[in-house]
Amino acid sequence: MIPVRQTLSKPDVEISYLEWHQGQEPLLLLHGMGDHALVWLSLGEHLAADYHIVAPDMRGHGDSSKPEKDYSFESAIADLEALMDKLGWSTAHVVSHSWTGKLAVIWARQNPQRLRSITLIDPIFIWKMPSFLKITFPLLYRVLPFLKSMGPFASYEQAQEQIKQLSQYQSWNVIQQQVFQAGIEQKPNGTWGSKFTIAARDGIFAAVMEVPGFIGPIDTPALFIQPEKGVNRQNWQIQPYTTNLTNLELCRVPGNHWPFLTAPEPFNQTVAKFLATQTGNGH
């Protein structure tokens, strides 16, 4: 089933999203920083028969609006709740990756009745950042490999050659190529670069550093997906989740930080199995 591209219009932003409207159970798929909704193509196809699936381009990403400021967790959550309201959903299951893993935890803490379950795929920076890290962090994130996909690149061909070196595109399969093509654009000056903006990058990093994920226990059913070559490889990284998520399942999968792009079959099966325990949608 091919997803349909739709738009939510709010007074401040427009949120573009993909929709698989075959099944009934509400499911939101939230991409990580610098990505967009198309990263969920394989998972969406895998789950479409049982779920009504919506995957938004988060503000500042993909085909959604690119405001110059306001990349707080509150704004992102307000976008998602407005999207749910448009769809007529009072609650939904949420699958989240990287930065939106922290967002899902904050959302479950602030408004638990909207989330039936949360799936956290290799989430990042769950704590509030210590002040001494804030000084060095901007220098650090500018050299994070996946942000090199932002460009600028002199040509489309140069962009493709550089991006093929990144770990999430390592096999350069059909879906990875589609994700790359959908996330890049030619700029007014003729160069090529990501649709993800610097304002969004800086705003999201500031929010991630300033807002703690956990401040107490959360009883929303949760799945933590730990890729073999992801960023969460040590027990101390997992411990905040095992301590604060009182209804948690932990599952290891093959692949790196982007298992849905690099090892999609076992990843899709892992998500489907967890969601089936929450919904009764067995395969």
Image: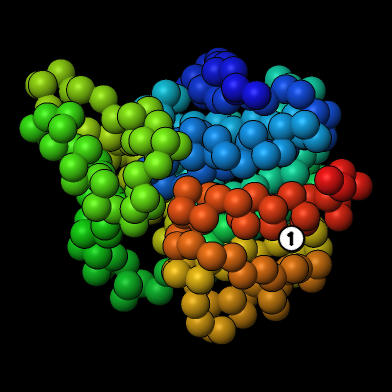
Badge 1 amino acid: Ala
Give percent across and percent down for residue 13: 48, 22
Residue 98 appears in the figure: no
The crowd level at tag 1 (other Cα within 10 Å; few <14, some 14-19, many 20+) is many
Q: Residue at x 52, y 55 (%)?
A: 263
Question: Is residue 29 shown above or below 217?
Answer: above
Question: Residue 56, relative to residue 241: is it above or below?
Answer: above
Residue 148, image x, y percentages: 22, 49
- Please report the residue visible at 72 percent of the width from the left and 32 percent of the height from the top: 48
Q: Is residue 144 left or right of residue 171?
A: left
Left or right, 153 with respect to 181, comes to left
| Res. 21 image quadrant | top right
The percent coordinates of residue 80 (x first, y second) are 62, 34
| Residue occupying image coordinates x 65% and y 64% | 224
Q: On the rendered image, what quadrant is the N terminus found in? A: top right
Query: Which residue, given by chain and number where applicable, does mark 1 sit on?
Result: 222
* Image location of residue 171, percent across then percent down: 37, 50
Relative to 268, residue 12 above or below? above
Q: Secondary structure at mark 1?
A: strand
**In the image, residue 27 above or below residue 66:** below
| Coloration mode | rainbow
Task: From the viewer's side, name the closer residue of 120 and 42.
Answer: 42
Q: From where the camera sits, is residue 248 visible?
A: yes
Give the residue displayed 22% in from the left and 33% down from the top: 193
